[in-house]
Image (tube, rainbow, N blue to C red):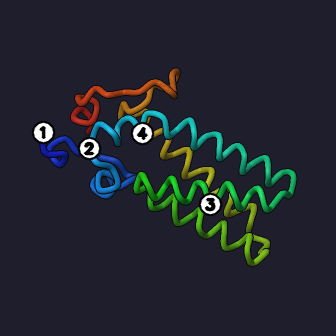
Amino acid sequence: MPDPGQCEPALRHMDWTRAMGNHQREEQLRAFLAEYPADLRRKVQEMEQALLNKDFNRLQEAAQQVMGSSSFVAAMQLHDLAMQLEEAIDLETGSIPEKTQKVVEEAQELEKELIQAGFVHKDEPSRSQSNSKACCNVS
């Protein structure tokens, strides 16, 4: 089995080494990342809709789900932003819309990065990409 560090993709929105620690094999992480953006996109849309409807319970639930999944893939910036949103909802602060927007923007950046790194085809977000060359060609 090749050393995962040999083919570590250059990612700004997630920590590859840390994500590898949450998965038994690189293939499992890659399979998860191939599906993750579509799931994240659904959660983000749910957050936006909940905010529009002022359904803060639903917004908080979605933020908690984003927090958990982003931790699993070591997208720590997204995790921290989702945690700040969740805390703002708990405290009922006026910063909820801004914090929601920050989570949305970071999630979109992570999704873009995963697509550009070859984990997911932009036009086929649920198709698994197991080609190990993808990470080695990222500069």
Q: Amino acid at mark 3?
A: Gln
Circles 4 and 1: CB distance less than 8 Å? no
Q: Residue 63 bears which disc, if any?
A: none
Q: Amino acid at mark 4?
A: Leu
Circles 1 and 2: CB distance less than 8 Å? yes
Q: Earlier in the sequence, mark 4 or mark 2?
A: 2
Q: Circle 1 is placed at which residue position?
A: 1
| Residue that extends furthest to the bottom in the rendered view of this protein | 91
Q: Circle 2 is placed at which residue position?
A: 25
Dot 3: what SS? helix
Q: Position of residue 132 (x, y in %)?
A: 24, 30
Q: Circle 3 is placed at which residue position?
A: 64
Q: Residue at x 36, y 27 (%)?
A: 129
User: Which is in the foreground here, disc 4 or disc 2?
Assistant: 2
Disc 4 and disc 1: Cα gap in Å?
20 Å
Q: Position of residue 67 (x, y in %)?
A: 55, 59
Q: Earlier in the sequence, mark 1 or mark 3?
A: 1
Q: Position of residue 43 (x, y in %)?
A: 65, 46
